[in-house]
Amino acid sequence: MSPAVVASGADPSGAPRGGGKLIIVGTPIGNMGDLSERARQAFAAVDLIACEDTRRTGLLLSNCGIANPGMVVANEHTEHDRIGRVLEVLAAGGSVAIASDAGMPTISDPGAALVRAAAQAGFEVVAVPGPTAASSAIALSGFAATRWVFEGFIPRKGSERAARLVELADERRVVVFYEAPHRLLRTLADLAEVFGVDRECSVARELTKMHEAVWRGSLGRAVDEVGEPRGEYVIVIDQAPPLAPVTDDELRAAVHAAIHAGTSTKDASAEVAARFGVGRRRVYQLATEG
Ligand code: SAM
């Protein structure tokens, strides 16, 4: 194995040295120029590649002039069945790369089950980081994403979708969604309805590719202005504005209602404090003042 790949492998968990190594390899999300030197070295050095699609990863290898070391398909249906084979190679002291079709494996892609299995079996697991659509889209949004939450693909329909949107509507972190082109406009419309038409968003399309484009503006305008959906998309939603601070009168009314319903003053104060996100002592004082 090449020195650069080996050098990255210090494992904080203290996994045994000298055994096999699982390498999570990030690959381009569209632009082959984004394949890193370390990714090449990893592919050239491993004994096996567990990938989503052998044709796609095979093409990547042949573009780089790297011989195919042997591949197994580890996609959403087969990943669990590949654990045995991967652990076998690692147990024999070999190394295995995980690659998905694009970007970082495990990010809305297979790979996590193999990572978990290898780590639990005590093998060294390292990442060769590569592009991921989420991080580029966040950077391009211009939102202050000191805190962000990755939602990936939201449920397509039904009560699960509605509940997820409601759950996220007041999220104080930037929210990132992946979306397929044929569902983009529907999702933007639903987001506008639940998050409000004034919420700022950024819609990044075909990142790193020829037709890369980023639309920025309010959710209310997005459906009409993003254009005909084609290609791959990431939707980034700016954080919700802070909720108006709750007043003493509102807290007093809430805690007295709870006490009136039979809850003890202490429990009512705790419950109301949690509900409104304020300190218990403040509610207790309001509940007990003369
Ligand atoms: N593992 C990938 C990553 O690290 O970003 C994500 C794979 S997921 C199956 C595919 C989704 O990622 C697409 O539907 C799209 O939402 C997003 N995506 C991937 N590549 C993209 C690109 N070049 N531009 C915009 N979105 C992209």
Image (tube, rainbow, N blue to C red):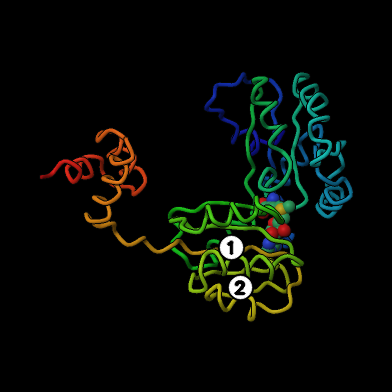
| Sooner in the amino-acid sequence: mark 2 or mark 1 | 1
Instruction: State the image coordinates of residue 246 (x, y, percent, origin top left).
Output: 28, 56
* Residue bearing the label numbered 1: 137
**Mark 1 is on which residue type?**
Ala
Task: Give the answer, above or below, for where 124 lies relative to 23.
Answer: above
Side of 147 relative to 16 (left or right): left
Q: Is residue 221 visible?
A: yes
Ligand 1 within 8 angstroms of badge 2 C-beta:
no
Splitting the image into 4 quarters, where does residue 183 fall?
bottom right
Instruction: State the image coordinates of residue 57 (x, y, percent, origin top left).
Output: 83, 48
Q: Residue at x 63, y 68 (%)?
A: 188
Q: Residue at x 61, y 64 (%)?
A: 235
Q: Residue at x 76, y 46 (%)?
A: 100
Splitting the image into 4 quarters, where does residue 88 fall?
top right
| Marks 2/1: CA–CA distance | 8 Å
Ligand 1 within 8 angstroms of badge 1 C-beta:
yes
Instruction: State the image coordinates of residue 252 (x, y, percent, origin top left).
Output: 23, 50
Circle 2 — which element?
strand
* Residue bearing the label numbered 2: 214
Task: Give the answer, above or below, for where 71 lies relative to 221.
Answer: above
Q: Along the line of sight, which residue is nearer the eye, 244 or 84?
A: 244
Circle 1 — which element?
helix
Instruction: State the image coordinates of residue 127 (x, y, percent, origin top left).
Output: 63, 39
Splitting the image into 4 quarters, where does residue 270 fall?
top left
Checking the image for residue 82, the label placed there is none
Q: Quadrant of the N terminus?
A: top right
Ligand 1 resides in the quarter of the picture at bottom right
Residue count near mark 1 (Cα–Cα under 10 Å), binned few <14, some 14–19, many ≥20: many
Side of 260 relative to 170 (left or right): left
Q: Are marks 2 and 1 in contact (CB under 8 Å)?
A: yes
**Mark 2 is on which residue type?**
Val
Q: Quadrant of the C terminus?
A: top left
